[in-house]
Image (cartoon, rainbow, N blue to C red):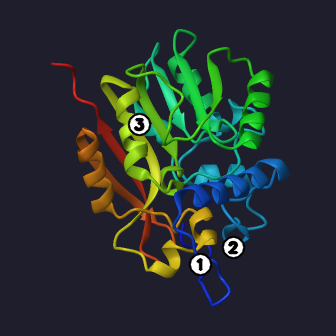
Amino acid sequence: MTDETPTAPTTDETTPTDTDPTTRRSTVRDEYGSIASTDCDCCGTDDTTIEADETASDRARSIGYDATDLEGTPDDANLGLGCGNPIAISNLEVGETVLDLGSGGGFDCFLAAREVGPEGRAIGVDMTPEMLEKARANARESDLENVEFRLGEIEHLPVADGTIDAIISNCVVNLSPEKPRVLAEAFRVLRPGGRLAISDLVATEPLPDEVRENPEAVTACVGGAATIDEMDRWLDDAGFVDVSITIEGEWTDDLPIVSARIEARKPEAE
């Protein structure tokens, strides 16, 4: 992806920095609300917009989706915002209930709904009202009756304890200012034996403060990237077992950011 993702923005004397979780979350919500409202084929801020001659479908193919995936979902569901294909690693089975953290326009949710079939259920959670409106409109246009979208923050999931078989997410956890809480919530809602299968961006070494605290870098999905060691520790602290973090490829030329598959499992009940 190094040819497709321009360098992350850097700070100067006039660039605001912000470490407050509430304000940072609001910044992310505003940015992705704008993306949903303008129907742009972009990933993050103007500094990380995909190339002009590259469509959201092109981006999806470049990160692991195929033509069947694109043809089987509503046209407006794929916004070109992902960094991998969590469906490919989730091993979904017919009849399961799957939860998508930060579901956006609903692309992965629709794919998951087809995988689990009419006997199963796909639930998307997103904190951005504009994204939720888009996803629900896409659902009305689809032929799927086993998919739904809920407004909520991934740090405070509107989902009951122990009701989910599999959790997916695509380049969203990095946007959260409270990642350990996200993982704790994921653990809470999973059934015993349930699994986590997400695609996200992680850092191979700590990022400099001027990147981590730059709102534009955060909304571009790089400023908030946790290190691999941090992610591994937080998953362990949340109670997950069989943790696996697999690097898939470099994401930027100038920062130690990589795309990764992050997999883990909630232990079976004793």
| Residue 226 spot, x, y in % from top left | 40, 62
**Around disc 1, counting alpha carbons within 10 Å, would you say few (fewer than 14), some (14 to 19), or many (20 or more)?**
some
Residue at horizontal 62 percent and vertical 79 percent from the top: 9
What secondary structure is found at the residue carrying circle 1?
A: loop
Residue at horizontal 58 percent and vertical 23 percent from the top: 113
Residue 189 position by quadrant = top left
**Where is 65 relative to 223, above or below?**
above
Amino acid type shown at disc 2: Asp
Tag 2 residue: 47
Residue at horizontal 70 percent and vertical 33 percent from the top: 71
Amino acid type shown at disc 3: Glu
Query: How much space separates mark 3 and mark 1, taking CA atoms?
Result: 32 Å
| Residue 126 spot, x, y in % from top left | 62, 39
Tag 3 residue: 185
Q: Residue furthest bottom?
A: 13
Residue 194 position by quadrant = top left
Q: Which mark is residue 31?
A: none
Q: Nearer the viewer, residue 209 or 250?
A: 209
Pointers 3 and 1 in contact (C-beta within 8 Å): no
Lateral position of residue 269 relative to residue 167, left or right: left
Residue at horizontal 62 percent and vertical 75 percent from the top: 6
| Residue 104 spot, x, y in % from top left | 66, 42
**Around disc 2, counting alpha carbons within 10 Å, would you say few (fewer than 14), some (14 to 19), or many (20 or more)?**
some
**Where is 250 relative to 107, above or below?**
below
Tag 1 residue: 7
Amino acid type shown at disc 1: Thr
Q: Nearer the viewer, mark 3 or mark 1?
A: 3
If you read the primary sequence from the N terminus, does the residue marked by circle 2 or circle 1 appear first?
A: 1
**Where is 91 relative to 104, above or below?**
above
